[in-house]
Image (cartoon, rainbow, N blue to C red):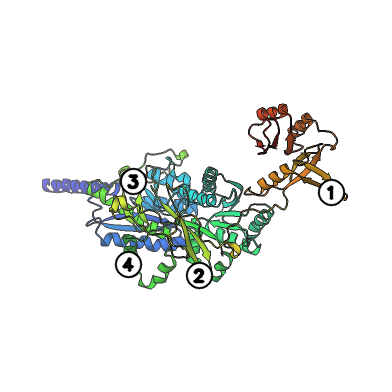
Amino acid sequence: MQDYQFLAVMCCVLLMQTWCWATAVATSSTLNDFSASVKIGAILDFNSPIGSFARKTIELAVQDVNNAHLLNATQLELEMYDSGSNPVQGAASAVELVKGGVVAVVGPQSSAVSQFAAYIGKEATVPFISFGATDPNLSETQYPYFIRVAPSDVLQMQAVAAFVGNYGWKEVVMFHMDDDYGTNGASKLSDSLQRKGSKIVDKVAFVPWVEKDGIDKELSMLTNRQTRIFIVHTQSDVGFLILQEAYYLNMMTSGYVWIVTDLVTTDLGSLQFDPKVQLYTQGVVGVRRYIRHSQELHNFVVSWKRSYPHLSLDLYVNQNNAYGLYAYDAVWTAARAISSYLNDEHEINFIKPPEKPTQSGGRSELAQMPIFQGGKTMRGYILNTSFVGASGVVKFDETGDLADAAFEYTNMVGRSLHVVGYWWANNSGVSLKLPPSTELSILDSAPDEEFFLAHDGKPETSTNMSIIWPGGDALTPRGWVLPKNGRPIKIGVPRKAGYTELVQVTINSDNTTTYTGFCIQVFEAALKYLPYAVPYTYEMFGDGLTTPEYSLLVQKLAHQVYLLYIVFFTEGRYTEFLRSACPDYLVICYPYYQLQLYSESYFYFNS
C-alpha cells in the first residue's frame, strides 16, 4: 500500500514539474529556446511596383544573412504580411506579427500604414525598420521604436527647393496627397522654399481614389494662373494620372515645368519603357535617392542573379529602385542588431501586458499583445548599427532617421530617364559633380573624383544642367506667364505742369493716353527683371494745369485707390515725409548730372 502511495506522489511531482516547465516555455522564451531560430516580420504592399520588388529583396536578404552565418548557429526566419497600403490592414498585420513573437519588423512600406504601426511598436517595444515611409513627422519622439533606412522627406524637399532656387523661380504650385505624408511633405517644402526666397502659391490635395474628372477640374483652373512650375508629391498612381491629364490639357508644352518626387520617379524608372508613359512624361524632372555604385551593390546584384536567374529582367527594370535596396538593407540592419543582442547574451523574453479594464478595451487583441522585454536594448543596437549596404551608408541619428543622404535629378527624354544633376545634405545647391563618398569614414577608401559629364565630355562644376523641358525646349522656362484672369494693379501717374522729360502724360486725338518720360522708362525696365508677371494699368492723376495736392495723393494711397505712384518731387519737405513714413518702399533715382539737394526722382511702392 505504501509503495502505491509513494508511486502516486512521485507521479504528481513529475506532472507538476512538467506543467511548470510547459508554463515557462509558453510564457517566456529564452536565448537557449531561440538558439535554433529568431523571427522577424515584414509588412509591405505585395501588389505595388515598389512592394513586389521589395518582397524579393527582403527574401534575398534573409537568405544572404543565413548563408553568411551572421547569427552563427541561429537561423533568421521571416514572416511577411500584405498591408495593401491600407492602414487598418497594416495595423492588423503588425499586431499579428507581434503576437507571433517577432523581435523586429521590416516595414511598413507606406507612411499611412507606418502611423499606425509606430504606435503598436511603441506599445510592444518591438522595433519597426521602415524602408519606404518618408513622412517627416515620423521622426518625432512619440515614435521611439520607429526607425527607417529610407531618408525623411525633410531632405528630399530641400533637394526640390534647391532645384527651384537654382533657376530663380519664385512661385510654384504643389500637388500632394490628402494625408499626413502629403501635407507634412508640403509643409517641409514650403519651409525649404522660403529659405530660397520662393513660395508655394497653390496647394492641391488629392485623395487616393481621385478620378480623372477631379484632376481635370483642378488643372483647368490652374491654366488661368501665371505660375507654370508644378511639383507632384503623391503616390505613383495618382502622380501618373496627374501627368496624363496635364498632357491632354496641353500643359506639357513649352513654358511648363513638371517636377515629381521620389515615389513617382522610382516607378517612372520602372515604367519608362512603356510607350504610353513615355508619351505624357516627356521633359518631366524627377527627384530620387542617389545610389552609388559600390562593392556592396555589386554583391547584391550577384546574389540576385544567383538566386533569381529567371528574374534578370526584373532586376534590370528596377535597377534604380532604391526602395528595394532599402528593404534589403533593413533586413541586414535587423540581423546585425540581433547578432549583437545574442552575442551579448541577452534573453529574448515576451511577457503579458498589464491588465486593463474591459471598458478600456482590455479584452481586445491590441490590449493583449505581448511585450518584448528586450525591445529597448534591441532598439539601442539598431541605432548604433553602422555599415555600408546596397543602398549606401546605413547610419542613424538619435531620432532613428538616416544620418545622411544624397539625391539625383533625372530628366525624361525619349525612351529613358537621364541623370542631370545631384544634391546632398550640407550642400547649398545643386551640383553636376557626384556626391562625395560618405563611405570614407567606414571604409577608409580613396575619395571618388568622378564627375557628371556634359555633352562635350568634359567635367562640369556649374549648375547649368542639360535638361530638355516639356515641349522639347532646351532653354530654361521663365516659370510664369501673364495671368488670364489676374486683376491689374492701378498705378497713379500725376499729370503736372513742368518736368515733362521725367513724367509726361499725353492725351491723344483718339482719346487714348500715353505715358512717357524717364521715370516711366525706369519703372517698365525694372518690371522686366521680376521673375513673375505684374499686370498693371496707368491712371492719370490731375488736370495737367496745376500741380496735384500731395496730401490728396497720400490720401488716395492710404485708401488703396492706387497701389503705386510714379511721381517726381521738387520740394524736400515731401521727400522727407516719405522717407519717415515709408522707408521700406521708397526707391530714389539720382540723375548723375544733377547735384542739387532736392532735385530727385522717386518711385514709391506699396506692397
Residue placed under numbered mark 3 in the picture: 383
Q: Earlier in the sequence, mark 4 or mark 2?
A: 2
Q: Secondary structure at mark 3?
A: helix
Q: Secondary structure at mark 2?
A: loop
Q: Nearer the viewer, residue 88 or 530?
A: 530
Q: Earlier in the sequence, mark 4 or mark 1?
A: 4
Question: How far apart, in angstroms, are the residues tagged by discs 4 and 1?
Answer: 77 Å
Nearest to viewer (mark 3 / mark 2): 2
Q: Secondary structure at mark 1?
A: loop
Residue placed under numbered mark 4 in the picture: 302
Q: Residue 369, percent across and down?
A: 38, 46
Position of residue 507 in the picture relative to residue 428 (left or right)? right
Position of residue 535 in the picture relative to residue 78 (left or right)? right
Q: Residue at x 45, y 61 (%)?
A: 50
Q: Residue 227, percent across and down?
A: 64, 52
Disc 3: CA contacts within 10 A as few (<14), some (14-19) or many (>=20): many
Residue placed under numbered mark 1 in the picture: 512
Q: Nearer the viewer, residue 169 or 539?
A: 539
Quadrant placement of the C terminus: top right
